[in-house]
Image (cartoon, rainbow, N blue to C red):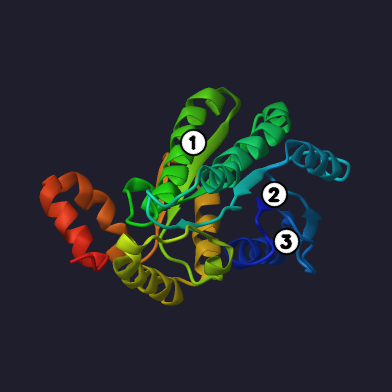
Amino acid sequence: MTIIITGTSSGIGFALAEYFGKKGNKVYGLSRKHTESQYFTSIPTDVTDNTAVQNAITEILKSETRIDVLINNAGMGMVGAVEDSTKEDILKLFSLNLAGPVQMMSAVLPKMREHQFGKIINVSSIGSEMGLPFRGFYSASKSALDKVTEAMRYEVYPWNIDVCSLHLGDIKTNIAENRVMAQVSEPYATVFDKVYALMNSHVNDGTEPVEVAEYIEKLLGKNKWKAHYYFGKFGQKIGVPLKWILPQGVYENLMKKYNKLD
């Protein structure tokens, strides 16, 4: 298969690109900086720049006759109270987490449509299903991507193109290095410090990136996809159905305890 993966300079994206390259697939990794690997071809690309995206796909199609899989993995985190977040940071976040994947999909769809086949995985978050404290805009950006995914499923199914959101729990990566950090104001400082420490603890104890690759490999073996898949530790995945099963007040109290807000 010919597979394009974004955000391959480190973390989940790098693990995915190496994993599928080792399996004999032709893998192209798109990220802002060049990445050395014997298992995939790195093409420096800023996915928020539509011209750069189009140029990257043009370059790939000089060597390939088809694009089988796109994995939209590039993204960033953002932490801070809603009140403290700036318009500039919000737009930066949505540019990468929402507009970037949309531009990538728009660039590969013509070739997928030509071959009447394609699979697109938009890497989302379990946090997209709920408003996480001090991560409200991150949750919102991934939730927006989920809704785009749902809409696209209706739009592209006539050409045998499948799209899904893969909601991940905490994965052991260096995501903390790439987060947008809002300036925390005094009223939130004490509780934010507790939540932020817990957040980093969850990442440090998270699932290994290679396990995400193994899960995606199984997904790619399926003929038909659901709109949403969830991967992570049970304690995080269970939060999704609990939100709809439990009374709202009970669920919010559980979230407060889980996030050490009480």
Q: Which mark is residue 24?
A: 3
In-image side of 239 versus 9 (left or right): left
Quadrant for the C terminus, please. Answer: bottom left
Question: Element at badge 1?
Answer: helix
In terms of image quadrants, where is residue 39? bottom right
Question: Element at badge 2?
Answer: strand
Which marked residue is nearer to the observer: mark 3 or mark 1?
A: 1
Residue 224 visible (yes or no): no
The residue at the point 21 percent across, 61 percent down is 256
Observer-nearest of 132 and 9: 132
Residue under circle 2?
4
Observer-nearest of 215 and 254: 254
Name the amino acid type tagged 2.
Answer: Ile
Question: Sequence order check: which comes first, mark 3 or mark 1?
Answer: 3
Residue under circle 1?
149
Name the amino acid type tagged 3.
Answer: Gly
